[in-house]
Image (spheres, rainbow, N blue to C red):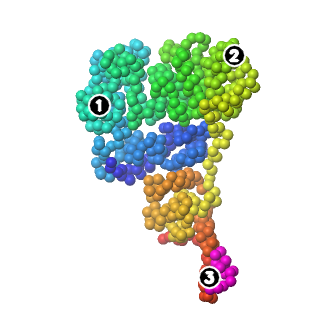
Amino acid sequence: MPLVKPSCVREIRARVNIVDVISRSVTLKKAGSRFKGLCPFHQEKSPSFHVNADMGVYKCFGCGKSGDLITFVRETEGLNFIETIESLGQRFNIPIEYESGAGPTREERSLRQELFELHEIAAQHYHDAFRAEDKTGEWMRNYWQADRQFDLELAKEFKIGAADANGSNLGAELMKRGFSESALRQCGLFFIYDDAAINLRSLRHRFRGRLMIPIRDHQGRVVAFTARQTALTPDNDPAKDAKYVNSPETPIFTKSHLLFNLDRARTEAKEGHPFVLVEGQLDALRAWSVGLKTAVAPQGTSITEGQLALLRRYHNQIECFFDGDGAGQKAALRFLPMALAAGLEVKFITGDGDAKLDPDLLMMEKGVEGYEAVRDSALSAMSFACHSLVPEGRKSPAEKKSAAMNPLFEIVVSAESEVARSEFLKEAANHLGLSISALATDFERYRRHGARRAPAPRRDENPPPEPGPISPITVSPEEHLLLICLHFEEFGKPLSHTLPHKWIDTQHPAGALLNRILAEFEQDAWPGTAELNESGLLETPEEKTLAASLLFETPQMDDPTKVAEEGVQKLRLRALQPRLRQIELALSQPQSDSQSDAISLLKERSELQRQLRQPLRLAPVA
């Protein structure tokens, strides 16, 4: 793969705001001159992830992750450097230039980028088929409007499509556009025998006679499809009896990591509206069509810890709007412990009385007002669990109450704090008509012996300290001087002429990095802090973390020159004092050697003492 021109990388760093990049996957709030939010690299409840827009860096004070906008995209999306630059260029309309001049061939381009482009073309192809004035298009539009009660504007907005029962020319179109064999084999849109050559006959369509719903990642890129069975689905379809068929997992699609409609819903969640979790894509589309803009749906039958963590980045509240049948209740009870462990506040919208709630029908008939009406009677997490497991409450026989204890305790133990656990136990005791002390005793026994889940870490009790200005006194003199070099680059050259290499302790990250940076200044090759991550100067993860931490903060110093000179003086003292002590010890011992050796030691001692007394000033640089 050809190398991207350095000037192109510099342009991306100059034109792309790191806050714009990170806010696509993390809800950031202004905190003074910086931004903060929940870390995307580890699970937490209190924000410890900070972004410095001026310096173009981020730092998590909980897990230690740090870097710039390129590092962030690489680590959160699992891309290599070239893929990251291509992705950012595409996202922010910045042309990518390559060292070869002509850019990569289709074979040289990354597979992921090919698959993103291929899926956009496929989505447009299916949407064009939905709009076409032919038998398939007319039938699908009628099904969409008459049977599903959706309008065509919604179909256009979400690019709803149609897969012809007899296949289509999608394969021919993709081959004509020059997509690689790897992309065609791994896109998930076709059945292809492993040993078959790629041609029009070997590309057998996975989706036929189905309504096509594009699945987008949190950045809005099409990565997969959900295909809804219709009367047009042929009898020889391998998945004929399956109401919904999803794309298989591919290099750009892992169903446990995505939520349908999150790319749109997260914008509303940032405004303070809680997410509404529904069971399927069509439920989410119904919610969107009536004005409920925060509805999301899992990609399959159950929600995962990864999906819950993704939601937690944007909002800490979820309202579950599931079908009122047994399957919906079971799904809710399964994910409830995971949601509590993820630090989410969960409410359940169940409807009134004994009527089974059908969210799709309710919103179709009554719109968002119908949702608001049932939302007023939403149940808390423990209240929902109690009503689901022991519907008759106090009237239930003792054996039924006993049978519900372990499932209830599994939910209680998942709460993040003792306060929350105590409140949950009170709710359960009240619902079941039991003594709170007896229930608490049974819970402690369960926690000691029978808990299948370890209590979630109580992350709020000791939240990471807020970053503050760095004082001139740092962990080591080397770190002290690194701070100067990174924030006051005009001192780099004078320091490189003043500080001897042998005074620096290169056995530790700060010293090793300082030594390399000063060498760059001395050779007039310093790339600047904006290029530090890609310069090759940061050789270890420890050095990268250290550099990001120092870049992130604002030095607290009135006189940087004085601070720099004090740092060099400390290194001088540390370098010369051990030898001075050795000389003093040697002179205090009986002299068995010649008088000339003693005189030599005295001269060396005098010189060392002179150096230590002499005020140290930074060397002037022309």
Task: Give the label, 2 or 3, closer to the camera.
Answer: 2
Q: Give the Cα distance between marks 2 and 3.
A: 92 Å
Residue 585 part of the magenta-drawn span: yes
Q: Which residues are magenta?
A: 581-593
Residue 409 position, x and y percent, is: 65, 26
Q: Is residue 271 above or below residue 109?
A: above
Describe residue 253's horizontal placement relative to residue 370 as left or right: left
Magenta-drawn stretch contains 587: yes
Front residue (pair 383, 97): 383
Total numbered labels: 3
Left or right of residue 34, residue 118 in this image: left
50 up-or-down from 594: above or below: above
What is the residue that sits farthest to the top in this orientation? 354
* Residue that mark 2 sits on: 398
Earlier residue among tags 1 and 2: 1
In this orientation, does residue 379 appear?
no
- Residue found at x 25% / y 34%: 197
Q: Is residue 496 left or right of residue 609?
A: left
Circle 3 — which element? helix
Q: Position of residue 153 (x, y in %)?
A: 40, 22
Q: Earlier in the sequence, mark 3 or mark 1?
A: 1
Q: Quadrant of residue 43?
A: top right
Identify residue for label 3.
601
Disc number placed over residue 193 in the picture, else none: 1
**Relative to residue 578, is residue 514 depicted above or below?**
above
| Residue type for callout 2 | Ala
